[in-house]
Image: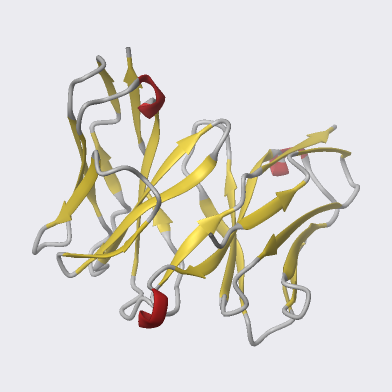
Amino acid sequence: GENVEQHPSTLSVQEGDSAVIKCTYSDSASNYFPWYKQELGKRPQLIIDIRSNVGEKKDQRIAVTLNKTAKHFSLHITETQPEDSAVYFCAASIGVGGLTGRRALTFGSGTRLQVQP
Amino acid sequence: KAGVTQTPRYLIKTRGQQVTLSCSPISGHRSVSWYQQTPGQGLQFLFEYFSETQRNKGNFPGRFSGRQFSNSRSEMNVSTLELGDSALYLCASNMSPSGTSYNEQFFGPGTRLTVL
């Protein structure tokens, strides 16, 4: 079936460095790509999202890039801080309803980011 | 606005039992999705309900079922529990009316189910 692959599964960086997490998807009709941050013991929270008609989106230290041709998108965090330590999930809207056009969010397996002070 | 709420927060059951989990979406949200989160498998999509109808379904056995009420509250039921059903069950609501595009999913705190 259609899926979303996420790499790396763990990432350790020094405070102040940049972190990049990459995801690939298989459904060429996917049109919505959110990124969620889940801190230990808490619920996932949206940090940034991008739609298929946009190639890049930025929000302060966080940016997401989308390459529709290659079917991959990436999360970039600059000037990392210890509070950025969490599990990050990418997701893509994947078709689940055949010709109905219905879509469901399919999540990657997550990346555990650790920012060392 | 109050966020998504889930009850109970913790549950301990034994194999073979059944369980019902509840989710109340953000006021005005008509779409509720359910996910299973385990350490090894990440977030797995179970199903989505919209206007009391199951709109989408993931690849889970028929032991997993759900429903949605007229006030958009949703319940999820798991029958004949197995050890592998131990997980954090998250529900999420969003405003998406059509099912063909998405807006932000807002997650609840989850129900941690332990099957002994």
Q: Nearer the viewer, residue B18 or B102?
A: B18
- Badge count: 0
Q: Position of residue A34 (x, y in %)?
A: 58, 64
Q: Position of residue A30 (x, y in %)?
A: 57, 75
Query: Can you say which quadrant of the picture contains the N terminus of chain B?
Result: bottom left
Q: Residue furthest left?
A: B70
Q: Position of residue A49 (x, y in %)?
A: 60, 69
At x 28%, y 60%, the residue is B26
Q: Is residue B5 left or right of residue B52?
A: right
B81, above or below B56, in the image: above
A27, above or below A10, in the image: below
Q: Position of residue A35 (x, y in %)?
A: 61, 59
At x 76%, y 80%, the residue is A69
Query: Can you say which quadrant of the picture contains the C terminus of chain B?
Result: top left
At x 28%, y 46%, the residue is B5
Q: Nearer the viewer, residue B98 or B18?
A: B18
